Amino acid sequence: MDLSNKRILVVGASSETGETIVKQILSLGANVIMVDCFEDKVKDIFNKSSNPQLSYHTFDFYNNAEIEVNIKHLNMTFGAFDGFVYCAGKGGVRPLQLTKNAFIHDMMNANLYSFVEIIRCVTKKGFFNNGGSMVAISSVSSIKGLKSKISYSASKAALDASIRGMAAELSEKKIRVNSILKGWVTSDMKLDFIQDNMELNKNEDFEKQILGVIEPIEIANTVCFLLSDATKTITGASIIHDGGYSI
Amino acid sequence: MQHLVSFSDKLIMVTGASAGIGQETAILLSNLGAKLVLIATNEERLQNTMNMLVGNGHKYFCYDLADLENIENKVNEIVSICGKFDGFVNCVGIRSRRPLSLLSIKEIRNVMDVNFGSFIEMTRCITKKANFNEGLSIVGVSSIASHAGGVSVTAYAASKAAVEAAVRCLSKELANKKIRLNTVVPSQINTPEYANLLQMSGGVDNVLGRQYLGLGDPSDVANAIAFLLCPASKFITGISLPVDGGYLSS
């Protein structure tokens, strides 16, 4: 795989998986613009890297009103993009009786609305090159049900459905849109809501992942594969990368 | 169907009952002995549906399910008047056709609120202990858009996929209350909405080319809903049942 001469926008770059994705894209020769809500984290990644092909920008992309102006700024600063990776988003578990509308909205906003709004803005004329590729990190929760993951599962399924719609629409510009349905990744296991989930589902969930827990680099490899021209006829697909969880 | 499925003395709520699949479902369920509670926004059309029902004791309530905040009060009011529910069919939904460049966040939110948020809130309220009888079955109406991408239906497809994903989670969560949840996944069905679609497209419908059993009738979907509501399907939960004339497998 070769990503030389490509300019890739990575939104949500400061998470452990996001950082790994950034490093892997860089190692394959592309220019990377990291975007995150948290300046300290993304600046730290930037400072630790000596790669001149790495840049960063911070803004609150969960605030929908901020997206259009910031995407314009990125376009003016860096030029048109060849790739976009969305590894931002939120998780959380709540039983139905506590799944009120505000909670649903918050999850949908992070996992769907911001993603679609970024694509709407970044596909304006001159912002994204023909033949470009977009990749979103989704989850097997999109296709498999678990107790108390109503909002999270729904938001990821909505994300996957949205990529199919956008893939159909953006095919005219030869822009591809795909997602990765990831299973449990080592970096996830440290999050509080995962601990809650382990309690709720009595660990049965982890045993279903027969190849074990995934390392972030493996997700990064699948992202790079989908960004590369090796997949120029793959679009609207949700690639399952789950260690056998869903079989 | 008449022998397999019976709803004598069962109370079933149908939202979006004033037209199309919701109306047809209400009519079929009344023929099968159910007492119905119908919900929709347009009173005139609701009364029209009421006039087509068989049997007595049916009730209707005008309510706009986009008003998510007041659903709980409305459900409590309905239960105090009509009693506990044995079934809930969610047929409420709005279609949205907008190219990406015109797909504002406001539009996505509105579609998600009506098609997904109201379904979750209704389910949350109906599944409270005092509001349902043992064996409650819930059926949501999804769409093939949830599975197959289409141009300009991004928000609609996302909302329907969200419904199906939530049903998979809820069927697991509510199994200990012996509540079942499923969705039906219709393709092109001969409803007023479909007529509008054809009008907009100048009579062209590319989907039908892959829908090898032809255009569906609302009764095809209503039959599938009735089956998933009744005890004959008591071992089926968390599924998305295509009623699509072969579209998704073609």
Image (tube, rainbow, N blue to C red):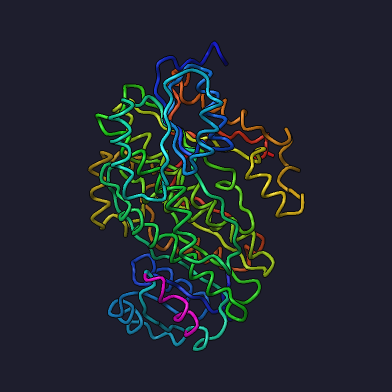
Q: Is residue A63 above or below residue A99?
A: below
Whether residue B203 sits left or right of residue B160 in the image: it is right
Q: Residue at x 43, y 29 (%)?
A: B237
Please tell me which residue is depicted at 71% across the width and 39% down the height of the picture. Answer: B211
Residue B138 visible to an observer of this rendering: no
Question: In which quarter of the view is residue B122 placed?
Answer: top left
- Viewer-side residue, A145 vs A121: A121
Residue B13 appears left or right of B74: right
| Quadrant the N terminus of chain B occupies | top right
Of A99 and A179, the residue lying toward us: A99
Q: Quadrant of the C terminus of chain B?
A: top right
Q: Is residue B112 above or below residue B134?
A: below
Q: Position of residue B55 (x, y in %)?
A: 49, 17
How many numbered tags mark residues here? 0
Q: Classify A22 as above or below A213.
A: below
The residue positioned 64% from the left and 42% from the top of the image is B192
Where residue A41 sits, quadrant-wise, is: bottom left
